[in-house]
Image (cartoon, rainbow, N blue to C red):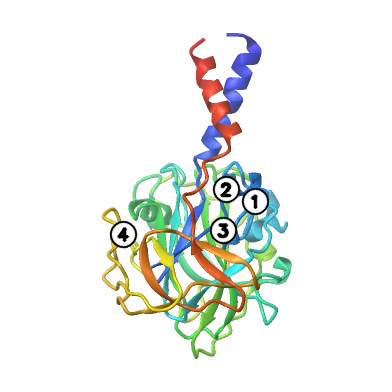
Amino acid sequence: MSFSSKTLLSALAGAVTVAAHGHVTNIVINGLSYQNYDPFSFPYQQNPPTVVGWTASNTDNGFVAPDAFASPDIICHKSATNAGGHAVVAAGDKIFIQWDTWPESHHGPVIDYLANCGSAGCEKVDKTTLKFFKIDEVGLVDGSKAPGVWGSDQLIANGNAWMVQIPADIAPGNYVLRHEIIALHSGNQPNGAQNYPQCFNLQITGSGTSNPDGVLGTALYKPDDAGILANIYNAPFTYSIPGPALISGAASIAQAKSAITASATAVTGSATAAPAPAATTTTTAAPAAATTTTAASVDAGATVIVSPGATATTAAPAAGATSTASAPRPTRCAGRDKKRRHARDLGKN
């Protein structure tokens, strides 16, 4: 094999390794599944669908490193821009966050934040003005043996998914949900930690009055925080989760084996919930068949994509907006597949 071929093969193998990190594919609220921004297909579409997840340029499923903690990239991932739609959720309800994959070697905490977007709505808010408060965190579960058992391990055991509860007393309004995994497998060296933030637009309903103080996204962490510059290979050890403290009223949810119906079709008018697909499990607190769910409110004329599957009852969307079942997810970039096939062919030489 030539030097150039070896170099190309090494580079492509590295790209495949990076791509294995993962991203959120969808979130589920009361049986209705909302598609997230897909970094593998949407950047290559002329008119990508309107979704509730913020766009980002992490087409390699990459991360934000500590040397970028003071940059806007740490807020909602690299070059993130506002999602065009938002999902409606009641204070006290749970949100199921589904990742496509997560590597077992990437141990670390799972953290969730909310930030109030104000009256302008999260579709238009300047992300650098958002102040985040922490509503959920799971860090080191067992540090008796290296590298320990972490929130990320619970996420993997739960089918690469995470459940978070919106605080029951939170004031109604427009919020960004910031969901994040921090991988610490290289956290024992400066700039070695890897942050994977994901953001979603929510409209929270209810009669709560709590308006917690928050922290700007660019001030959440410092590169030398004890929870960032951390050695997970010297057991036994303890760990301090980085970022602000949990707010009063934050709820802790047991993650192991919990799940929720992960597919539903938004329809208008009255309908009853159909049985979940055979491959889907449900939580013990599954929504009742007659439950009414708001699919999403978006700018007039826009469409929010939800996943096909079981039927859920929905309220009428905002004026001019529609909610529709998506077609099957587009295949990943053909160029990426060609590169992978080419890398395999080179390996045979």
Q: Is residue 123 visible?
A: yes
Whether pointer 1 and pointer 4 mark residues with C-beta atoms closer than 8 Å, the reply is no
What amino acid type should be assigned to the residue bearing mark 4? Ala
Residue ID at (41%, 43%):
104
Mark 4 element type: loop
Q: Nearer the viewer, mark 4 or mark 2?
A: 4
Sequence order check: which comes first, mark 4 or mark 2? 2
Residue depicted at 30% across the width and 77% down the height: 288
Task: Please tell me the numbered disc located at residue 198.
Answer: 3
Q: Quadrant of residue 124?
A: bottom right
Residue 192 versus residue 55 in the image, above or below: above
Position of 105 compared to 76: left or right? left
Q: Can you tell which mark lies on residue 66?
A: 1
Query: Residue 145: where, in percent of width, then height?
Result: 35, 46
In the image, is residue 231 above or below residue 342? below
Q: Secondary structure at mark 3?
A: strand
**Placement of 255 over or under 129, stated as above or below:** above
Nearest-to-viewer mark from 1 and 3? 3
Q: Which residue is mark 4?
A: 256
